[in-house]
Image: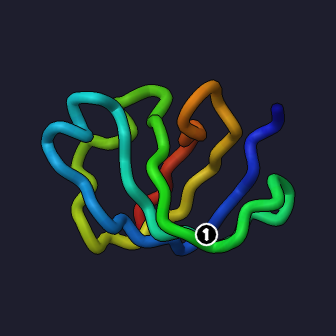
Amino acid sequence: MRAHLLALSTILAFTAAEAAGGTLTIRRQPIAALGWPAMTMSFRATPAAFLKGLKVGQKIGFDARQGTGLPELTAIRKQ
């Protein structure tokens, strides 16, 4: 499935365990192309190196796609 562009989402929770597991919890805007309303949810970073240097409360833009299990982050842009 094609990646979908999102903007100005907020990192809500981010722990060392999440970083080690390659996941990130984000409060995000709606994703109309996937039929998802605005909500807080976890994403898997592909690759996990995307998570380096991120902090709780930081604003980011990102691209995502529906993965197997957790949705996948395919790009992160620090704001």
Furthest residue in direction left, as rendered: 16
Judging depth in this view, the residue of 43 and 50 nearest the camera is: 43
Task: Classify residue 55 as left or right of residue 16.
Answer: right
Badge count? 1
Q: Write down the quadrant of residue 51 in the picture.
A: top left
Identified by mark 1, the residue type is Ala
**Quadrant including the C terminus:** bottom left
Judging depth in this view, the residue of 60 and 67 nearest the camera is: 67
- Look at the picture and state if 64 lies above or below 37: above
- Look at the picture and state if 19 lies above or below 68: below
Q: Residue at x 54, y 41 (%)?
A: 73
Task: Classify residue 56 as left or right of residue 78.
Answer: left
> What residue is disc 1 on?
7
Mark 1 surroundings within 10 Å by alpha-carbon count, few (fewer than 14), some (14 through 19), many (20 or more)? some
Q: Residue at x 59, y 40 (%)?
A: 71
Furthest residue in direction front, as rendered: 69
- Look at the picture and state if 39 lies above or below 48: below
**Quadrant including the N terminus:** top right
Q: Position of residue 9 (x, y in %)?
A: 50, 70
Secondary structure, mark 1, is strand
Judging depth in this view, the residue of 35 and 62 nearest the camera is: 35
Q: Position of residue 38 (x, y in %)?
A: 63, 73
Q: Residue at x 27, y 61 (%)?
A: 13
Colour scheme used in the picture? rainbow
